[in-house]
């Protein structure tokens, strides 16, 4: 067998092997979504990482991670969980306030108009979904109460100055 023929045969074998090798295309955003489901769905930003209610942390800049397990020291883990619920409470209070303002603003504006207010959703135009606004507002108000309950369970009395009317 000539040298040229050997090189050609080796090239064809390599090409055949490349075709037969399985190709895996990892979907890191899907992995992150699954990670969120496993660790409580919601996270807060904490010291440059995403912190979950069970103490797991994840990269705030890359879907591929890294990720960090909960702290092994139970006292440190308790401090971290308290921090999670305090930050989540603060976020939920802010978002609930904004949701109330938007819902009230739409309600007041609609009262002053003879027709139905319209909103653009992508390329579609439809009536403003007041029920969705109210649902979002209610969900956030419920989340505020959940955060307060969790903080109480963790031995933290939510700040008396913090209310759902903030």
Image: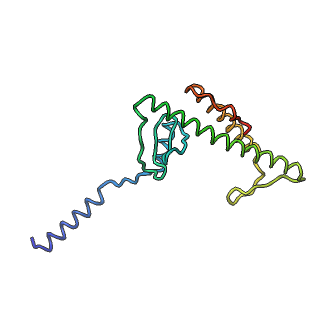
Q: Residue at x 49, y 37 (%)?
A: 39
Side of 7 relative to 148 (left or right): left
Front residue of 94/13: it is 94
Residue at image point 53% right, 45% down: 45
Q: Is residue 117 above or below residue 96?
A: below
Q: In x, y percent, where is residue 145?
A: 66, 31
Residue 95 x/y as whole percent:
67, 44
The spot of residue 101 in percent (x, y) is 76, 46
Residue 60 shown left or right of residue 20 in the figure:
right
Q: How many numbered marks are there?
A: 0
90, above or below 122, in the image: above
Reply above or below: 123 against 155: below
- What residue is rendered at 49% in x and 30% in y? 78
Q: Quadrant of the N terminus?
A: bottom left
Taking depth in this image into account, of 115 and 162 the one nearest to the observer is: 162
Is 54 left, or right, of 22 in this rendering?
Answer: right
Q: Residue furthest left?
A: 1
Say which of 114 and 96 sits in front.
Answer: 96
Q: Is residue 111 above or below residue 56?
A: below
């Amino acid at each position: 067998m000539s040298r040229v023929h050997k090189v050609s045969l080796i090239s064809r074998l390599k090409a055949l092997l490349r075709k037969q090798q399985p190709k895996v295309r990892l979907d890191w955003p899907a992995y992150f979504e699954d990670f969120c489901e496993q660790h409580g769905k919601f996270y807060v930003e904490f010291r440059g990482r995403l912190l979950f209610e069970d103490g797991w942390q994840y990269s705030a800049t890359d879907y591929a991670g890294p990720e960090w397990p909960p702290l092994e020291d139970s006292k440190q883990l308790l401090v971290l969980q308290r921090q999670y619920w305090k930050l989540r409470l603060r976020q939920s209070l802010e978002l609930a306030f904004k949701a109330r303002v938007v819902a009230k603003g739409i309600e007041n504006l609609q009262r002053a108009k003879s027709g139905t207010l319209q909103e653009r959703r992508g390329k579609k135009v439809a009536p403003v979904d007041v029920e969705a606004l109210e649902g979002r507002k209610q969900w956030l108000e419920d989340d505020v109460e959940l955060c307060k309950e969790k903080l109480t369970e963790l031995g933290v009395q939510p700040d008396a100055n913090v209310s759902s009317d903030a």
